[in-house]
Amino acid sequence: MLSKLLKPRFPSSAVGIEKGAASIVQLDRSRGGFVIKRASSVNLPRDLILPAFDESNIADPSELVAALSDLMTSAGLLRQRKWSVALPEASTKAAILTLEGAARSRSEVEEVLEWKTERALGAPINELRIAREPLPPNEQKQARYLVTGVRIDVLAEYESVFAALAWQTGLILPRHAGEEQWLRNGQHGDALLLTTHNDGFTAVLMRRNQPVTLRSVVCDEDECDDELHRFLLFYGDRAGSPAGEEGPSVDRLLVLGRPLDKQHVVDVMRDTLGVNLRPLDAGDVGLTIPAGDIPFDVIAAPAGLARLAW
């Protein structure tokens, strides 16, 4: 009972917003996994959403309100009011912070975390809306935190649209935060998420259901392959493996979005890490998508946030 009182109840419906597209999902729990109950997607004008951390994101809020309203109608969710939201990846920043040195008082920890957050995200703390998740200590017993931030003025643009739709949005996170939920499934070994966006890609290495490495790479489309190769070399050389195991232990791979070619990612991982993995699909992570519905790449982020309802 206490757990139910203290743990927030997230909605089983979520929306994902990207440059040029928006998608909407309502999940239901099924035996051994989840099933798409309702889903829809829509193409948006390419200049309507301009994802950026430091600049205005929405060119015409009223046009976005109309598009999302049509999207809810097509999914049969026009009366749904409680939503989780996956924002465009480039609109947010995230980092894993480590507290070095001896144990500190609570006030000292907070001060250091604020300083590290400002340096990692590149903005004053009073200009940001921050989400912070404590992570297990590293092998040196140092405290670690996952921080995600969005500028207050950028978030206000999206919240004004949600308010116009009479939405109650209790959870607003970047795209990768929804997608990584499909790798928090209790399995041993490392899991790697590679998700691409207009400005590059984000790589998240999961271990014991928690992110241990997070790297957001800004690059042109023709540079993605080289940057991916560098990240995998970094993982192989420095990220290490769980105690008592030898070599990189990545055994699950989730590749979402374009322009990364999934087979090419497999080839690069085989060359750099010596592992031969098949990228996971919806069925592999416990999500059933009815035949003819939206591709997993399109709805992975909002569906990942929707599964937090359970």
Image (cartoon, rainbow, N blue to C red):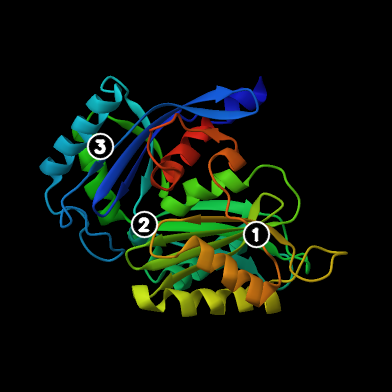
Could you classify mark 3 by the number of other residues whose Cα lies within 10 Å: few (under 14), some (14-19), or many (20 or more)? many
- Rendered image: mark on residue 150: 2
Percent across and percent down for residue 52 are 28, 63
Residue 110 in the image: above or below residue 305: below
The residue tagged 1 is 277
Percent across and percent down for residue 120 are 47, 71
Tell me the SS state at disc 3.
helix
State which quarter of the image contains the C terminus.
Answer: top right
Q: Residue, x 57% and y 44% (percent of image)?
A: 182
Which numbered disc flags the more N-terminal residue, 1 or 3?
Answer: 3
Q: Along the line of sight, which residue is nearer the eye, 80 or 117? A: 80
Q: Residue, x 35% and y 62% (percent of image)?
A: 90
Tell me the SS state at disc 1.
loop
Q: Alpha-carbon distance for marks 1 and 3?
A: 40 Å
Which numbered disc flags the more N-terminal residue, 2 or 1?
Answer: 2
Q: Which image quarter: residue 235?
A: bottom right
The residue tagged 3 is 162
Could you classify mark 1 by the number of other residues whose Cα lies within 10 Å: few (under 14), some (14-19), or many (20 or more)? some
